[in-house]
Amino acid sequence: MNLLSTLMLLPQEAEESGINLLVRYFNDGGNFMWPVLIILVIGLAIAFERVISLNRADVNTRKFILNVKRALEDGGISAAEEVCANTRGPVASVFQAGLLRVDEGIDAVEKAVVAYGSIEMSFLERGLVWLSLFIALAPMFGFLGTVVGMVEAFDAIEAAGDISPSLVARGIKIALLTTVFGLIAAIILQFFYNYAVSKIDRIVVEMEEASIELIDSLVLMKAGQPLTESPGISTSGGTAAG
């Protein structure tokens, strides 16, 4: 029983010692650790908001296009608009903007799709400028703490008139800790930034391809041809191979 209790306590002790070690390193890093921490917290808040928003905006585009085509065939423009209104994401918003201009002609639909596509893209990229700024600022504050730490080390040497490890240890420790913390914060935020950018690129490509398919569908509808018998239409998601 004593051995089992000891084994059960080991993870808790390791976790507590790890947390205490991080707190001690943070305190030893000096004042420049706080700006880096603030940057990391705010950057993570922006990153999490972007990840959640982009995942919500990501829908099964092929299935949505097929539903719109069926609605156009069965109920006309109003039915297709209802499908768009009940679907989240930028693709549905662009479709709805185009369908609202059908009465003005295909050219008006194309202009509306392009204009609203740019608006939706700006919404997708919202907050990424700040995230990019924080990625640059985090290591800069870390390097600034490095310079300050080295200045303190040389000040200690100058005041003592002698070089001793105990004199320069604190300054060098501050220099190293601030650099490490700044780089870690930048690496974490860079991962989320790249994920968001790749997600936005894929959504934009799907939005452009879907917009072209909407124009083609409206042209076919005006010509009285069927919309849902086109080859390559699939409900499994992704872009059909052409």
Image (cartoon, rainbow, N blue to C red):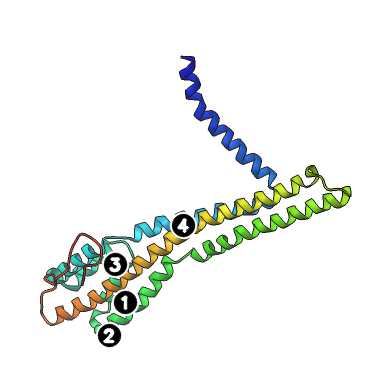
Q: Quadrant of the C terminus?
A: bottom left
| Pointer 1 residue | 113
Instruction: Quote the CA–CA distance across marks 4 and 3.
Output: 26 Å
| Pointer 3 residue | 92
116 vs 51: above or below = below
Which label number is shown at residue 192? 4
Point out the tag, 4 or 2, that comes first from the N-terminus: 2
The residue at the point 75 percent across, 49 percent down is: 171
Q: Amino acid at mark 3?
A: Ala
x then y, percent, for residue 110 = 29, 81
x then y, percent, for residue 58 = 32, 60
Q: Residues within 10 Å of mark 2 (few under 14, many from 20)?
A: few
220 vs 206: above or below = below
Instruction: Quote the CA–CA distance across marks 1 and 2.
Output: 10 Å
Q: Amino acid at mark 2?
A: Asp
Q: Report if the CB atoms under discs 1 and 2 are less than 8 Å apart.
A: no
Q: Residues within 10 Å of mark 3 (few under 14, many from 20)?
A: many
From the viewer's side, name the closer residue of 145 and 167. Answer: 167
x then y, percent, for residue 106 = 24, 83
Q: Residues within 10 Å of mark 4 (few under 14, many from 20)?
A: many
Disc nearest the viewer among 4 and 1: 4
The residue at the point 56 percent across, 53 percent down is: 185
Instruction: Quote the CA–CA distance across marks 4 and 1.
Output: 29 Å
Instruction: Quote the CA–CA distance across marks 3 and 2.
Output: 19 Å
